[in-house]
Amino acid sequence: MNFTDKQIIKIVAYLLLVLALTQAAFTALYVSKIELSRQFFWGLEGLLFTVLLAFAGAAMVQLKNEQLGWSAIAFSAVLNVVQVAIGVTMFGTFSESASEVEGLKPALSGVVALSFMIYYAAKLLLGMAALVFGMVTMSDTNKALGGLTALLGGVAMLSNAILILFGRDGFLPSGVAGTSGVLATLFLAFCLISAARKA
């Protein structure tokens, strides 16, 4: 089965759009303390990121330009699948065990820290992709959209890099990195939709 360049760009764009909206919805429900199925949300994310990996990987080798951006999207998808898998398979088990056995609390903290480290790395890569495609959009078609996307990408890269370096207990709240990463992903999707129209 062969996909045209335009089809691949559109599929990646819409996958990123759905992922950004899914993450925003999950966060809003969680903050509002509304009961939700983590298994469903994280399972859906894992599925979407797996498909994203295939199409971003195809774009990386098939399309002639912006390989850095496509590579960043593809490898962020790999990291996100791993991070979601840890959340789905290990958070519940370690939480239950740590509530029964005091000595397992450090192990639970370690699993959570590992998951967040992977999360920050994935968001940093999506920020990099937003920076790359934002700059391309700024020079090719839409200066306002491209400039805002590049700015959000730079903020996502910087904030997630800080959290990778200093950890969740450092001076930058984890929510800043997550929010900037989701916004960068959303506007990256808009840039790719714009690019697909031109392809």
Image (cartoon, rainbow, N blue to C red):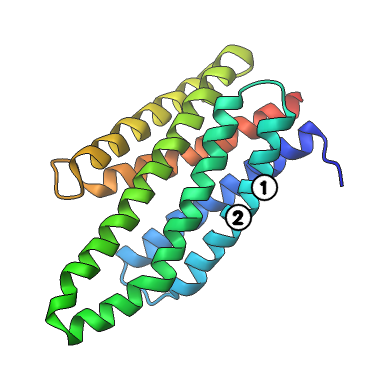
Q: Looking at this view, name the residue that lies furthest to the top.
A: 139
Element marked by disc 2: helix
The correct choice, above or below, for 167 with respect to 126 in the image is below
Q: Which mark is residue 134?
A: none
Mark 2 highlights which residue? Answer: 50
Cβ atoms at labels 2 and 1 below 8 Å apart: yes
| Residue nearest the observer in this picture, 196 or 49 | 49
In the depicted structure, whether residue 110 falls above or below residue 165: below
Amino acid at dot 1? Ala
Q: Residues within 10 Å of mark 2 (few under 14, many from 20)?
A: some
Location of residue 121 in the rendering, given as x and y in whole percent from the top left corner: 38, 42
Q: Amino acid at mark 2?
A: Thr
x, y percentage for residue 196? Answer: 72, 31
Give coordinates of residue 104: x percent, y percent.
19, 76
Q: Quadrant of residue 171?
A: top left
Tell whether 160 sits left or right of 183: left
Q: CA distance from mark 2 to mark 1?
A: 7 Å
Q: Nearer the viewer, residue 42 or 18?
A: 42
Residue to which mark 1 is pinned: 54
Residue 123 spot, x, y in % from top left: 41, 42
| 100 or 66, nearer to the observer | 100
Assign the C terminus to one quadrant of the image: top right
Within 10 Å of the Cα at label 1, are there few (<14), some (14-19), or many (20+) other Cα atoms?
some
Give the secondary structure at mark 1.
helix
Q: Residue at x 58, y 38 (%)?
A: 189
Q: Residue at x 31, y 49 (%)?
A: 117
Q: Is residue 34 above or below residue 61?
A: below
